[in-house]
Amino acid sequence: GRSEEKKKNKKKGEQLDKQGNHEEAKKYFGKSMVISSKMINLLIDVLHKLGIEVVMAPYEADAQISYLCKEGLADFAVSEDSDITVFGCPTLATKLQPGGDC
């Protein structure tokens, strides 16, 4: 599953880093990141302090996010994949990078 894939990406990143291929290693390290509940809660706290509303879904949120975008309640969705298009999401940014590029 995802956990095994993240472990493989971390190992590949470490190998590339040892070989001096730091840029390529960064890509694999990024794919190996685990987002903790503490990180999520910190982000939500910062967003609330900035006056930005947050909606949390208990499970997969593709249908919910698509609805919010279609109704004009959200400007766009950010996703790692395009599964959300099945639900007719009108605006989607995929593979969002730390610098804001897609």
Image: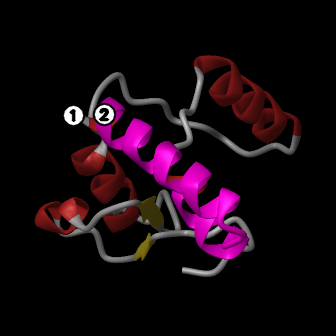
The quarter of the image holding the N terminus is top left
Q: Residues within 10 Å of mark 1 (few under 14, many from 20)?
A: few
Q: Residue at x 48, y 68 (%)?
A: 76
Residue in view at x 86 percent, y 44 percent = 50
Q: Name the residue at 48% across, 30% down.
A: 56
Reading the image, the residue beneath label 1 is 1
Q: Is residue 15 left or right of residue 99?
A: left
Identity of the amino acid at label 2? Glu
Q: Residue at x 64, y 29 (%)?
A: 40
Percent across and percent down for residue 66 are 29, 58
Q: Which residues are magenta?
A: 3-28
Between marks 1 and 2 in the image, the one whose residue lies nearer the viewer: 2
Q: Is residue 14 above or below residue 94?
A: above
74, above or below 14, in the image: below
Residue 83 image offset from top left, x and y in percent: 19, 60
State the mark number for residue 56.
none
Q: Amino acid at mark 1?
A: Gly
Work out how far the residue at label 1 is from the one at label 2, CA to CA, in angstroms: 6 Å
Residue 66 located left or right of residue 85:
right
The residue where tag 2 is placed is 4
On the image, the x and y values in percent for residue 14 come to 60, 50
Determine whether 52 is above or below 3 in the image. Answer: below
